[in-house]
Image (spheres, helix red, strand yellow):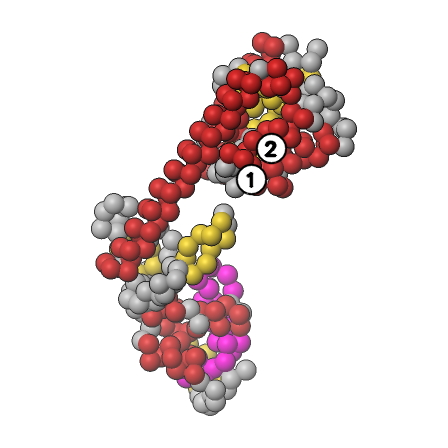
Amino acid sequence: MELAISYKRFSSLVQGKGRSEGRQDDETEAYCSQKGYKIYETFIDRGVSAYRGENSDKGDLKAILDLAAAGKIKPGTHIVVESLDRITRQETTSALSLFLNIINLGLAIDTTFDEQIYTKERCDADPFAAMGAILVLMRGHNESKTKSKRIKDARAADRKNAREHKIPVNSRCPAWLKVVGLRGEKREFAKLDDLVEIIKLVFRAYDDGLGCMSVAKLLNRNNIKSLTGKTWNAGTVQRLLRNEAVIGVYQPQVYIRKHKRVPDGQGKIEGYYPEIISPALFIGYSGRSTPKRITAGIAGTTAVGRS
């Protein structure tokens, strides 16, 4: 009985909540049963991009390659995948290099989608087999490239609407706001009044002379939870006082790679969020150096000085 390794991959964790992983499981089991293979190990890259080569750089696919290079996977073992695009969606030369690396290690690549078996021996003897693999690899890359461009264009259009019409880019927003309306409609921000009042309270207390730690203690003594529902500390107060979103300012971000964003080169957008703190009070925070000695009361609590 020939040995097989099941390799599965999907690029988005959202796909993991659907049928992607289960479908690949079912297809692999049915295929191996038909071929008489014994699956002795399963590898899976969840939420890992093959377009950027993350699975072969640091994912489970790299683990397979390392084991094969170390002689820990028996030559002739079949790597069973749904399609070649589960292995790679990189540009043609990089994809072909990875494909050749796998078969040159003595492994076979079986694809359940079209029931192809790629081995070094087959590709050497039948150039059309290798050409067929190259065409599949090119198609996978072009599909991902097209999808990536569409996503980038859509995000650019969202940023343009944000600058020109102050329409929310997406549903993410500061804790004291919520987005109403769906994409494609007239989305807008709505204030959560209870949280807005807490923010105003923080700024008033600080403006009256309390330091960040004193503000945090004052809020905690009066059982006023932070914007995330937790207790306050000096750090959470300071981050709020420095958050330009309270004066309506938003800094768009652009992706330079997966999970890595940098500020949009066109700069910040003023008036994007509803203003809940006056710019004068916000500037007063950022520029204040000498505190006032004050007596500030919240629900009958007195605090003096600045920590």
- Give percent across and percent down for residue 1: 70, 10
- The mark nearer the N terminus, 2 or 1, is 1
Q: Looking at the figure, which quarter contains the C terminus?
A: bottom right
Name the secondary structure under disc 2: helix
- Give percent across and percent down for residue 6: 61, 24
Q: Nearer the viewer, residue 242 or 166?
A: 166
Residue under numbered circle 1: 53
The part of the image, by quadrant, that contains residue 41 is top right
Please state which amino acid type lies under the numbered disc 2: Leu
Residue extending farthest to the right is 71
Image point 57% across, 41% down: which residue?
Answer: 54
The part of the image, by quadrant, that contains residue 28 is top right
Residue 29, compared with residue 18, is above or below; it is above
Q: Does residue 224 show up magenta in the picture?
A: yes
- Give percent across and percent down for residue 69: 73, 32
Image point 46% across, 34% down: which residue?
Answer: 141
Between marks 2 and 1 in the image, the one whose residue lies nearer the viewer: 2
Answer with left or right where residue 265 lies relative to residue 31: left
Answer with left or right where residue 169 lies relative to residue 105: left
**Is there CB contact under 8 Å for labels 2 and 1?**
yes
Q: Nearer the viewer, residue 69 or 203?
A: 69
Image point 39% across, 62% down: which residue?
Answer: 265
Which residues are drawn in magenta? 206-231
Please state which amino acid type lies under the numbered disc 1: Gly
Answer with left or right where residue 89 lies relative to residue 246: right
Few, some or many C-alpha atoms within 10 Å of disc 1 (few <14, some 14-19, many ≥20)? Answer: many
Mark on residue 131? none
Residue under numbered circle 2: 98
Few, some or many C-alpha atoms within 10 Å of disc 2 (few <14, some 14-19, many ≥20)? Answer: some
Q: Is residue 99 visible?
A: yes
Please state the total of marks drawn on the protein image: 2
